[in-house]
């Protein structure tokens, strides 16, 4: 009986080590995503490309165009897939597997609905009220909350 208890303790220790290793890798994935995409990428996209593509105005038409493009095009084709691709890279998964996980989270875990629920109102405020030079900073603050949501959703099947 003591041998069984020791075996269970060893298994528990192994599971704890594995969980820590997974958490460290997942954290690394989200740190890389934050630096590469949410930091440098968003600075370039929102402060350099968006003014060229959509103008610098804060009127309802310009704001709505930026918000809809950000949600419907950029988020679904760049923002979210890049998070899954970076996480796949860190976890040594294939591109196909990483994108399959992304599609699964959209279908099975409401990823896009959660993204839109948070980012539609945030984007409306950011593109209409927040000065251009503070937009990425404000997005980064809100992204901290989003990263918690994304981490929870994307880790469900692991």
Image: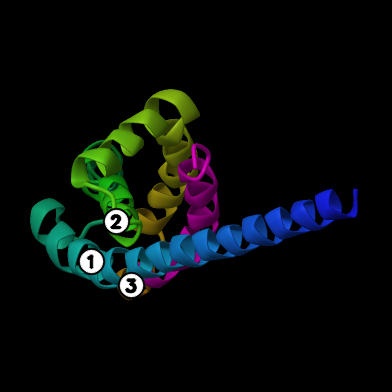
Quarter of image, res 44? bottom left
What numbered label is drawn on residue 35? 3
Closer to us: mark 3 or mark 1? 3
Dot 3 surroundings within 10 Å: few (below 14), some, or many (20 or more)? Answer: few
Q: Which residue is mark 2?
A: 92
Name the outermost residue toward the left. 52
Left or right: 13 in relation to 60: right
Is 36 above or below relative to 155? below
Observer-nearest of 69 and 75: 75
Closer to us: mark 3 or mark 2? 2
Dot 1 surroundings within 10 Å: few (below 14), some, or many (20 or more)? Answer: some
Q: Would you say residue 154 sits in the magenta stretch? A: yes
Q: Residue at x 45, y 25 (%)?
A: 108
Determine the CA span between mark 3 and mark 1: 8 Å
Looking at the image, can residue 130 be seen?
A: no
Question: Where's residue 31, x and y in %?
Answer: 41, 69
Question: Where's residue 30, x and y in %?
Answer: 41, 63
Determine the CA span between mark 3 and mark 2: 19 Å
Span shown in magenta: 136-158
Q: Which residue is mark 1?
A: 41
Is 128 above or below relative to 103? below
Q: Residue at x 34, y 69 (%)?
A: 32
Determine the CA span between mark 1 and mark 2: 23 Å
Question: Where's residue 21, x and y in %?
Answer: 52, 64
Q: Are marks 3 and 2 in contact (CB under 8 Å)?
A: no
* Comes first in the chain, label 1 or label 2: 1
* Comes first in the chain, label 3 or label 1: 3
Q: Would you say residue 12 sits in the magenta stretch? A: no
Secondary structure that dominates the magenta span: helix
């Amino acid at each position: 009986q003591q041998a069984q208890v020791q075996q269970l303790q060893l298994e528990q220790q192994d599971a704890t080590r594995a969980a820590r290793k997974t958490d460290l890798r997942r954290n690394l994935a989200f740190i890389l995503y934050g630096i590469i995409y949410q930091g440098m990428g968003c600075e370039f996209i929102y402060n350099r490309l968006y003014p060229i593509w959509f103008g610098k105005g804060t009127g309802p038409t310009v704001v709505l165009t930026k918000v809809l493009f950000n949600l419907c095009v950029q988020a679904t084709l760049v923002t979210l897939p890049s998070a899954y691709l970076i996480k796949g890279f860190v976890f040594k998964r294939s591109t196909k597997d990483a994108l399959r996980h992304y599609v699964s989270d959209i279908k099975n875990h409401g990823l896009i609905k959660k993204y839109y629920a948070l980012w539609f109102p945030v984007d409306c405020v950011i593109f209409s009220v927040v000065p251009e030079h503070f937009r990425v900073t404000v997005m980064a603050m809100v992204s901290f909350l989003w990263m918690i949501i994304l981490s929870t959703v994307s880790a469900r099947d692991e």
